[in-house]
Amino acid sequence: MITVLAFIVTLGLLIVVHEYGHYRVAVACGVKVLRFSVGFGRTLWSRQRGETEFVIAALPLGGYVRMLDEREAPVPEHELHRAFNRQSLAKRSAIVVAGPIANLLLAVLLYACAHWIGIEEAKAVFGTPAAGSVFERAGVRAGDWARAYSDGDERWQELASLNELNWQVIRHALNQQPMQLTVSDAQGRSQRQLTLELDRLQAREIDAETLQRIGLPGAFREPVMGEVRAGGPAQAAGLRSGDRIERIDGQPIGDAAPVFERIRAAVREGAGVTMSWRVRRGSETIDLTITPRVITEGTRAIGRIDAAVGTPPERVVVRYGPVEGLVKGVQRTWDMSVLSLKMLGRIVIGEASVRNLNGPLTIADAAGQSAQQGLVTFIGFLAVVSLSIGVLNLIPLPMLDGGHLMYYLFEAVTGRPVPDLWLARLQRGGVAILLLVMSVALYNDVARLLGLH
């Protein structure tokens, strides 16, 4: 139920904002607006306000603003000056571009609101990086605290949280540029600079393989035993809550992540493999052996010891003032918009997979999950979808706002509008392309649900 409500709120808000952008600028330009509709198809609710009918329709996958236009119906002579098609090229362009701009401005405001409210996130203290990854080659160690980053131009920007660091890493990887980090120990001492050679990945998209090569470490968690369940392998081995794990099979343990990996991998031919652990209990060092029990996860057999391992990661509240929060909102919206356009371009020329296209099912699922995680997370999700709508609508594809802007560019260059014959052909082609893209996105949604992707 939460997923459905969150999806309805998401679509409703973003469609209203988009169409309101068109509506508000049309009215400002003196154009008569006949209908403002949220959704398509059968009318569920309507109200007349002045000369405009406001409508909520049955199919909420978009909306439209219908304006007085001689191309759609005869216009009385006394109202010809209020017809859309009679407006100057500048006014028509402004009305068309207002919808996407409204979505982008909403994204800025939503990101700013999230920063003003404050977001509780994991502190940028690293766990153990994956072996052979970019992070490991750079010299990152468990417990390192990432303090600031640079694009290589000696302008350093502070990192407020692990989420912000992860975003910057992904941005640099997609831009194929190295990233410099200033790190210290957990107490802020012993600072040093590292270089993440993200440019060598030649990343075209952020998929599972790319993330594995980057080796983004999770949040640092102390390798300390939590709750030990009665009757499980951990209790049978003599482990207790509060024990600090120092070594497993002779290998030193710096944080909790390698413990999970070793436990899960301690399976051979369907049976648990006995491991040698060294733990510290108070001032005492204890050596013990533990044999995980085996469970099946999907098609893979993994080990379990029936105990919680690792302390919760340290968290910080990321909050900015009015001006800085707004600046951060503008910056994030710009960065996300640029990356979205680059990714779409790579999909078009075949450098990135069409699996990156998401449809309504994926959006609905993400809406529900973000709503369950709290208001700030849901606000961030709305910002992402809003800027995506803004960017997509600016693509020069017939049937989209960007397509209309291309018609107006042709008119500005040639001094005449696109011929009706070509306009009809382009519109049909645009419909075919949109249907194809929607079909691929919906297939991706179903494939993810079925575990095929």
Image: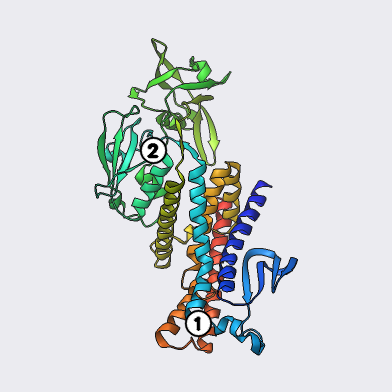
Number of residues whose C-alpha sits closer than 10 Å to that of mark 1, classed few (under 14), some (14–19) or many (20 or more): few
* Identity of the residue drawn at 47% across and 68% down: 394
Quarter of image, res 296: top right
Task: Name the element at disc 2.
Answer: loop
442 and 230: which one is in front?
442
Between the C-alphas of marks 1 and 2, the distance is 55 Å
Quarter of image, res 337: bottom left
* Identity of the residue drawn at 54% across and 67% down: 99
Residue beneath label 2, please?
217
Q: Earlier in the sequence, mark 1 or mark 2?
A: 1
Amino acid type, callout 1: Ser
Q: Is residue 59 left or right of residue 445?
A: right
User: Which label belongs to residue 88?
Assistant: 1
Looking at the picture, how far across and down is residue 219, in whole percent?
Answer: 42, 34
Pointers 1 and 2 in contact (C-beta within 8 Å)? no
Q: Is residue 273 left or right of residue 42?
A: left
Looking at the picture, how far across and down is residue 171, in whole percent?
Answer: 37, 52
Q: Is residue 440 left or right of residue 32?
A: left
Image: 216 above or below 305: below
Number of residues whose C-alpha sits closer than 10 Å to that of mark 2, classed few (under 14), some (14–19) or many (20 or more): many
* Circle 1 or circle 2, nearest the eye: 1
241 and 187: which one is in front?
187
